[in-house]
Image (cartoon, grey):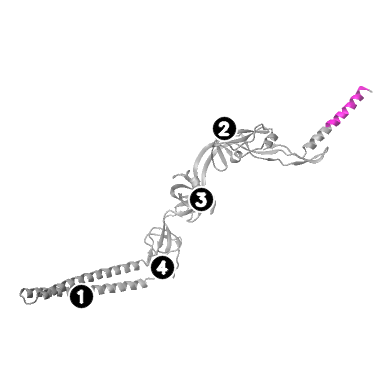
């Protein structure tokens, strides 16, 4: 046998063994799945940390206009959205009943005055009789008893006159009150403003009993408004007067309005088992887009950082398992939640694997977190999600149709 034939016989089995090894490896690894890693870049940018709450818009100065007398609405002189000035007539009540009360009070005053005049005449007569009795007594022409009776009559007449004069004053006060009530049938604007609510119609009867019914609501100036927002007690410690505020309303979902914290009220209120504190926010409304009663979704800007090194919040929540790290060829142990305050870790991409990088965090805006310490740099890529890769179908002529997968970092 020649050397060529011998080499050929020896090489054929070797080739067959190599092919079988490849087929066996492909068979054993068919259908395996390895972690798929999603990454994001470390960037620089502005971060603003905010406290979220909801509130209601209202005018800075709102006056409820009521009536101090009962009656039927005879005339409405204003309507919704009318601009009024102080003293302008808003409505009139039917004055007929109160006019009759004025006439009755005036008649009582005339009667009381006449009674007082009669008592004055009686007093003068008693005094004349007393003087005559005194003269007669000096001449011993009448008894002492008669003189005392004359003095008593004068005193009685004086007391009756004082009572009559008091009745005159009482009747005059009744007249004045009736006239004031009559004047109150004309409802006027107490301030310059705009009518934002009208609660009555012509012909409606209003009754002023223990509290005056509200007929109109006037807003002094709708170019300046405020938001009354309720902040949770867990957030109120970060909020101070003068802080910037942004908010949106459902009517203009693409518009962000701005304001400032004007007041944080000290008294907390229990709402749904949560203690909240009323926070008043001043808002400019020059374009009159905002309306009283709108719901505002408020964000109070409690902290900000310009040109901060930042990572997506998802990067700080990654907790890879030992199996995932082993599959990716990472030598580190799984991350944990322990550590000092504001400490954390991210997993940075290094080639085809990951490495754990401890970091110190700052403020967050809900999407990004500021990195204040650690070995991260801008443009590094950090893992934001780790999941099993989707297996893909392969048609291998050696092993037939199967599945395969592999690690992917993107």
- Can the viewer see residue 101 in this picture? yes
x%, y% of residue 276? Answer: 48, 50
Whether 81 is drawn above or below 162: the answer is above
Mark 2 and mark 4: span between their CA atoms? 73 Å
Residue shown at 49% from the left, 48% from the top: 231
Q: Is residue 3 magenta?
A: yes
Q: Are marks 1 and 3 in contact (CB under 8 Å)?
A: no
x%, y% of residue 300? Answer: 49, 46
Give the residue number, with chain letter if any, for mark 2: 374
Q: Are marks 2 and 4 in contact (CB under 8 Å)?
A: no
Q: Tell me where the magenta segment starts and ends, as one range.
A: 2-18
Mark 4 and mark 3: span between their CA atoms? 39 Å
Q: Which residue is the extreme one toward the top?
A: 3
Residue shown at 20% from the left, 75% from the top: 118
Whether 261 is drawn above or below 16: the answer is below
Q: Which residue is the extreme one toward the bottom?
A: 141
Q: Are marks 1 and 2 in contact (CB under 8 Å)?
A: no
Residue shown at 79% from the left, 37% from the top: 28
- The mark nearer the N terminus, 1 or 3, is 1
Q: Is residue 4 magenta?
A: yes
Q: The residue tagged with tag 1: helix, strand or loop?
A: helix
Of circles 3 and 2, the one toward us is 3
x%, y% of residue 181? Answer: 34, 67
Give the residue number, with chain letter if any, for mark 1: 118
- The mark nearer the N terminus, 3 or 2, is 3
Give the residue number, with chain letter if any, for mark 4: 207
- The mark nearer the N terminus, 1 or 2, is 1
Q: Which numbered dot is residue 274? A: 3
């Amino acid at each position: 046998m020649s050397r060529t034939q011998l080499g050929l016989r020896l090489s054929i089995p070797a080739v067959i063994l190599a092919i079988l090894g490849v087929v066996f490896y492909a068979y054993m690894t068919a259908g395996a799945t390895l972690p798929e890693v999603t990454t994001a870049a470390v960037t620089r940018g502005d971060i603003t940390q905010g406290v979220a709450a909801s509130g209601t818009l209202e005018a800075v100065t709102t006056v409820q206009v009521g009536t101090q007398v009962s009656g039927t609405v005879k005339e409405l002189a204003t309507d919704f959205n009318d601009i009024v000035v102080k003293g302008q007539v808003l409505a009139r009540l039917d004055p007929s009943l109160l006019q009759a009360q004025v006439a009755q009070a005036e008649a009582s005053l005339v009667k009381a005055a006449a009674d007082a005049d009669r008592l004055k005449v009686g007093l003068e007569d008693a005094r004349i009789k007393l003087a005559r009795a005194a003269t007669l007594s000096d001449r011993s022409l009448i008894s002492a008893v008669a003189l005392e009776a004359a003095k008593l009559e004068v005193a009685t007449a004086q007391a009756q006159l004082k009572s009559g004069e008091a009745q005159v004053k009482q009747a005059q006060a009744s007249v004045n009150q009736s006239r004031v009530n009559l004047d109150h049938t004309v409802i006027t604007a107490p301030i310059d403003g705009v009518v934002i609510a009208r609660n009555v119609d012509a012909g409606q009867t209003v009754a002023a009993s223990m509290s005056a019914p509200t007929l109109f609501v006037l807003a002094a100036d709708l170019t300046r408004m405020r938001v009354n927002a309720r902040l949770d007690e867990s957030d109120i410690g970060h909020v101070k007067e003068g802080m910037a505020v942004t908010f949106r309303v459902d009517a203009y979902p693409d518009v962000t309005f701005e304001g400032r914290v004007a007041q944080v009220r000290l008294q907390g209120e229990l709402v749904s088992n949560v203690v909240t504190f009323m926070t008043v926010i001043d808002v400019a409304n020059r374009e009159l887009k905002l309306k009283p009663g709108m719901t505002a979704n408020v964000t109070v800007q409690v902290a900000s950082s310009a040109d901060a090194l930042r990572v997506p919040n998802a990067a700080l929540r990654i907790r890879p398992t030992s199996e995932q790290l082993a599959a990716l060829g990472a030598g580190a142990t799984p991350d944990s939640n322990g550590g000092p305050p504001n400490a954390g870790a991210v997993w940075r991409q290094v080639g085809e694997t990951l490495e754990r990088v401890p970091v110190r965090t700052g403020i967050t805006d809900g999407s990004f977190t500021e990195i204040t310490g650690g070995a991260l740099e801008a443009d590094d890529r950090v893992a934001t999600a780790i999941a099993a890769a989707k297996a893909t179908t392969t048609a291998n002529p050696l092993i037939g149709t199967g599945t395969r997968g592999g690690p992917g970092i993107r």
